[in-house]
Image (cartoon, rainbow, N blue to C red):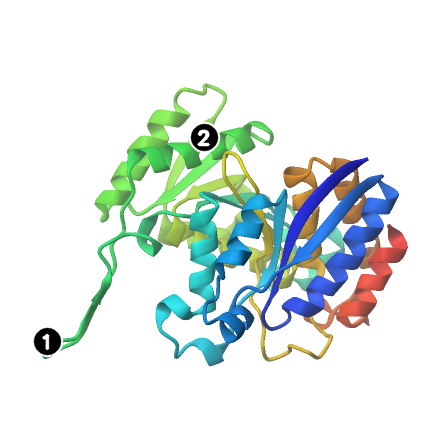
Amino acid sequence: MKKYKIVLLSGDGIGPEISDVSKKVLKELSKNHNFDIEIIEKLFGGIAYEKYGTPSPDETIDQCKKSDAVLLACVGDIKYDSLARELRPESGLLKLRSALNLFANIRPVKVRKSLLDASTLKKEIVEHVDLIVVRELIGGIYFGKPRGHITNTKIPKAFNTMVYDSAEIERITEIAIKIANQRNKKICSVDKSNVLEVSQLWRDTVLNITSKDKNISLSNIYVDNAAMQLVRDPGQFDVILTSNLFGDILSDLAAMLTGSIGMLPSASLNNNGPGVFEPVHGSAPDIAGKNIANPIAMLLSASMMLKIGLNEEEAAENLETAIDKVLSKGFRTADIADGSSEVLSCSEIGDKIMDEI
């Protein structure tokens, strides 16, 4: 029997609630598909800061490095916004990504047929949406130096540096090519090369790497136009390749095509070692503890973990099929409810999915 060790980071806000559902589902899947999964829970985010004075304790990071995969719920709360930047939960995320060298963030955006009416866009606009955002994750303006505040002047200033080298762009482009070759062989690279030198390097490097694969069809688009096109005609996109900052914004925009950001998973990967699998949504502290959160994005993240991180494709397929069956029967959490659906709590919809596994 295959044995896997995963680290579960429940984090903050609704994290513990959606994590409880995921734990139960993973245990059930492991029984049904004949593998053993050890779930090691560690503190991370605001809850870790409250106990250890840091959002990313060394013990947590070390355990993640030793695991087969990391399943992360969500971190953050407005009450931590007054902390020094390095102590905020979001800084813990940056440390985790850097420590595990997670340079590639993969965000699939697919509209499920049972949720076509949940999108705020017209049905005919979103019904064929099936795209993947490939975002460079540990470079660009979020990590660039120098950065800081200048306060000893009459007018306070702050600055950040957007920087990429060609090697960073090459390796994320190779990930996009690999994914595109498994799909429709189309890559749309997003940049702002008309005004940013770093984007010109991005465009030149992407063109150089993709030109070596004659199967790949490459197009380029400025980030502002990409945002507009995602709303106007999202079906035109297959694989979107972009930098850290632009990918952060565009992937959240694309998430809403599906009707709720609570429906989308993501994977953060490197070339070797454990990946981190997490829902796209935030910690939603305003509904924490009310048992009304949508656990499906985390369950779909668990599915990505099973498929990509553990190579348990049958279990992943079982989970996604179960989710689709529950949705097709009209069961919903409040965020994706329509007038004809039966609204269930976080734990209740988890139980329905368990019944279908």
Q: Secondary structure at mark 2?
A: helix
Q: Which mark is residue 22?
A: none
Left or right of 186 on screen, residue 33: right
Above or below, comparing residue 186 to residue 254 in the picture: above
Left or right of 199 on screen, residue 65: right
* Residue at horizontal 43 percent and vertical 56 percent from the top: 94
Is residue 65 at least partly visible in the picture? yes
Q: Position of residue 99 (x, y in %)?
A: 45, 48
Count of numbered circles in the view: 2
Disc 1 crowd, CA 10 A, few/some/many (<14, 14-19, 20+): few
Amino acid carrying label 1: it is Thr
Q: Residue 166 versus residue 264: which sits nearer the camera?
A: 166
Disc 2 crowd, CA 10 A, few/some/many (<14, 14-19, 20+): some
Instruction: Say which quarter of the image contains residue 119.
Output: bottom right
Circle 1/circle 2 CB separation < 8 Å: no
Q: Residue 338 versus residue 101: which sits nearer the camera?
A: 101
Q: Which residue is mark 2?
A: 174
Q: Which residue is mark 1?
A: 153
Between the residue at mark 1 and the residue at mark 2, the CA separation in whole angstroms equals 45 Å
Quadrant housing the N terminus = top right
Is residue 267 at least partly visible in the picture? no
Q: Position of residue 310 (x, y in %)?
A: 68, 38
* Residue at horizontal 43 percent and vertical 55 percent from the top: 95
Q: Residue 118 versus residue 321: which sits nearer the camera?
A: 321
* Residue at horizontal 64 percent and vertical 38 percent from the top: 308
Amino acid carrying label 2: it is Glu
- Looking at marks 1 and 2 on the same chain, the residue that comes earlier in the sequence is marked by 1
Left or right of 275 on screen, residue 29: right
Q: Position of residue 256 (x, y in %)?
A: 57, 60
Q: Position of residue 254 (x, y in %)?
A: 53, 54
